[in-house]
Image (spheres, rainbow, N blue to C red):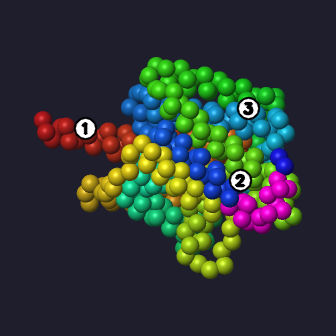
Amino acid sequence: MELSFLLDRFSEPVLLAGFGLFVGVVFGLSAQRSSFCLRAATVEFARGQLGPRMAVWLLTFSTAVIWVQGARLAGLFRPDEARMMAVAGSWSGAIIGGLMFGAGMVLARGCSGRLLVLAATGNLRSVVSGLVFAVTAQMALHGWLAPLRGWLAGLWTTPEGRNIDLMGALALPDTAGLTLGLALAALALWLAMRNAIGWSVLVFASGVGFAVALGWVLTFSLSQQAFDPVSITSATFSGPSANTLMFFLTEGAVLDFDIGLVPGVFLGAFLGAAAKGELRLQGFDGESQMRRSLGGAVLMGFGAMLAGGCAIGAGVTGGSIFVATAWLALLCMWIGAVATDFLVDQAGRGVMAGAQN
């Protein structure tokens, strides 16, 4: 990708932040209009359904895999140079953090990315929960919780100081990732037809996955032409939420992709909600919901930093380049979410029904 024109006119940090803003707007608009949410998909699955939320999540995931693997085959992106592939991964962090994050997103009624999208529409519950998530993530990254996170992550790590490429480890052909993405997309479209999902929702669900691929390609392309080292990354909301919070609270913070991403998602979701007349103020329904949401936000904040990413960062962005610990974290997020729905929500309904009888 030819970027010399932009590099001649903007500094590299400004250009990185601009890329993050652009990717964030595409992501936020698409996520808001498609109601993309991993938590909703896991709850459907836990209740024995393969409904519209599952179809939307699966289409987003498969679209990200198709676009990213297609870009890799076309020479537009090299996954082995991505930040999350170039550093050591943590098996223990993926397991423990994934379980925590999955439980937290059910309690908070949305993953970190979904909370940001809902906050842009006027949902004050998501604003408060999102801030708690960001503060907890920052504490786990550089604050009081950092030693605990480091100890848990260090229990079981990948060898040789790098993460593991699943396709390489399994000796799969170069086209295996693209083939898997196409197969998952076919399954998603079958579920969409069975649930009578409109084409506009499907287009926007695909847009979320496309935004992930866009982030990978843009940051990779800049890294090939920039003078200073550029971190090759894409959409995720654990580290960026913490970094964005500190950017606005402290002096000396520098612009990068993460700093543009979070405001971009907020802006895109706001524009999507405004266009559909879906902007409205909403708050907590009561004290119990507030305790539940804030507790879930804490679990997500710590869990995401321990797992190496959130439901988007590990679950879609890391999954699209076949980072081994990201796939494990995603599996554990599903397990944690399904178990929490069984033990908290479904069991709670059973107790209430029994009391009424």
Write down the residue under mark 3. 177
Q: CA distance from mark 1 to mark 3?
A: 42 Å
Rendering coords of residue 296 (x, y %): 42, 55
Toward the viewer: 31 or 278?
A: 278
Instruction: Specify the segment rendered in magenta.
Output: 3-17
Residue type (three-letter) at the residue carrying disc 2 = Thr
Dot 2: within a 10 Å radius of its alpha carbon, few (fewer than 14), some, or many (20 or more) residues? many
The circle on residue 350 is 1
Q: Residue at x 84, y 65 (%)?
A: 228
Q: Residue 347 occupies which quadrant of the picture? A: top left
Residue type (three-letter) at the residue carrying disc 1 = Gly
Q: Is residue 351 above or below residue 154?
A: above
Toward the viewer: 70 or 122?
A: 122
Q: Residue at x 45, y 30 (%)?
A: 52
Rendering coords of residue 70 (x, y %): 76, 34
Q: Is residue 239 visible?
A: no
Q: Is residue 262 visible?
A: yes
The circle on residue 233 is 2
Q: Earlier in the sequence, mark 2 or mark 1?
A: 2
Toward the viewer: 224 or 240?
A: 224
Rendering coords of residue 37 (x, y %): 48, 42
Q: Is residue 144 above or below residue 203?
A: below
Give the prevailing secondary structure in the magenta stretch: helix
Q: Nearer the viewer, mark 3 or mark 2?
A: 2
Dot 1: within a 10 Å radius of its alpha carbon, few (fewer than 14), some, or many (20 or more) residues? few
Q: Earlier in the sequence, mark 3 or mark 2?
A: 3
